[in-house]
Image (cartoon, rainbow, N blue to C red):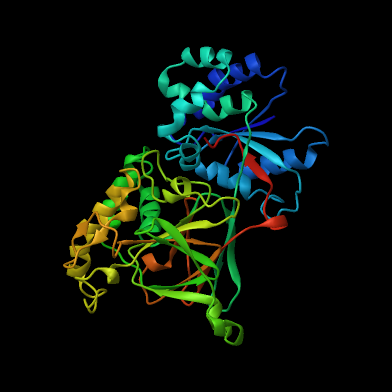
Amino acid sequence: MLIISNPYSGDKSGDKFLRETVVPLLERHGNGLVMDFKQTNGPGHAGELASDYLRSHGTGNIPIIMVSGGDTTIHEVFNGPGIATSSIKTKAEIILVPSGTANAMYHSLFPPSRVNEFLGGLREELINDLKAFPEEQGAKLYSVLHFLDNQRTRNLQSTRTRVVGPNGGVIHEVVSCVVVSTSLHASILDVAEELRAEHPGIERFKIAAGRSIRQWSQADVKIHYPYHIYDSSSQQFTLQTPPQDAADNPTRDVSIYSGPYAYFLTTTNVDRLEMQFRITPLATSLPVGDDEWMELLMIRPSRDPSFSSAGDWEGNEGIREQFAPKMMQILQGAYQDGAHVNMAYSATGGIVGDEQNTVVEYLRVREWTWLPEGTSSVAHLVCIDGQVLHIPAGGFVTAALLTGEDKADLSVYGGI
């Protein structure tokens, strides 16, 4: 087993937790498991360590990688040399030890509402060992226990995001395993990074949200067929296919959604971005089955009956100021077990718990393209698993779900 420790992640306590708690637990229950402990020394190093390990691993047992860090550290593994391009064909299994700030993937694999059910199925000797730890420490061991209990792994999806310049050349190409976003979420992550030194904990995201909540992004989004749209009245997804004339009209292989956007993101492998912030709840409450999709959630203020003819919103901060409390209400709904998905506009633009004219548009897609317009800086940001990149003027972003041989064959111990 390769153990990758990011000593700089979160509150920087992860490395000590690994050495004093996790490794002894593995020694007691791992049946002579051989462990190779490695510390990261900078950005991208986790991916390099994982790649070197997979390249040197012989045939026989499936290689196992334990990752202590946050979502960014997991992201680095997916982007390791040869892993991102899937030129390394070796299947690998991952154990997560959450030592980051938000730990979206970990909390999605082990949601608080199902932890007791998971613990109830563990072997007695593992439960007895777990009882010896303080509750806060024990909550970080679920993926380790999942491994020691020989439970099945869950396959991980990934997407490839490309930032394309005005001349059509690819400026950045990044694989993601948690979230790709623009608009408010990208702005929050951009501001939160500036706040990291002063506010190392999760509170910096709420501070950043307060500073960014009044910003909208003018952009067109192309959604590639086929895709699904969630219908809150039936609580089901409906399949969207190309119009009949699409074969004769190449531009009709996509559906165009025009801005402005207050919120836009897609997720894979997760239904939340913090333990309680369940932003794409249907990923788990209405699972898709064996097919693979990205969960897409967007909020377009033009759907608000009170703002549909609001005019020059870019030059009128008052319009965005009026919408900000509604946006905060929607985001608070994500903290209420994903209640925002069914929040709707009243005839006058208020937010009500209804099923008609929902504030949130929720889709399942395999590919999308973001084409920012104008000079708005926030419209030209894209966040990929916490990494914020700039889209140049005249450029665009495209994200596509990886499938088949294009996708790294990684699975994780978790998913209850």
**Residue 385 falls left or right of residue 27:** left
Q: Which quarter shows the N terminus?
A: top right
Q: Residue at x 71, y 17 (%)?
A: 31
Residue most extreme to the front? 234
Q: Is residue 13 above or below residue 104?
A: above
Observer able to see residue 140: no
Instruction: Count up the numbered dots.
Output: 0
Is residue 360 or residue 57 the one in the foreground?
360
- Residue occupying image coordinates x 54% and y 18%: 20
Q: Residue at the bottom extreme?
A: 248
Instruction: Look at the picture and state if 313 lies above or below 129.
Output: below
Q: Position of residue 310 (x, y in %)?
A: 21, 76
Rendering quarter of residue 342: bottom left
Left or right position of 235 against 395: left
Q: Indicate left or right for 65 with 117 as reference.
A: right
The reply to whether residue 204 is visible in this rendering is yes
- Rendered location of residue 87, percent (x, y): 75, 53
Percent across and percent down for residue 111 are: 44, 36
Q: Is residue 32 above or below residue 274?
A: above
Q: Nearer the viewer, residue 121 or 398?
A: 121
The quadrant holding residue 77 is top right
Which sits in the foreground, 114 or 129? 114
Percent position (x, y) of residue 233?
34, 59
Residue 52 appears left or right of 107: right
Q: Residue at x 28, y 54 (%)?
A: 330
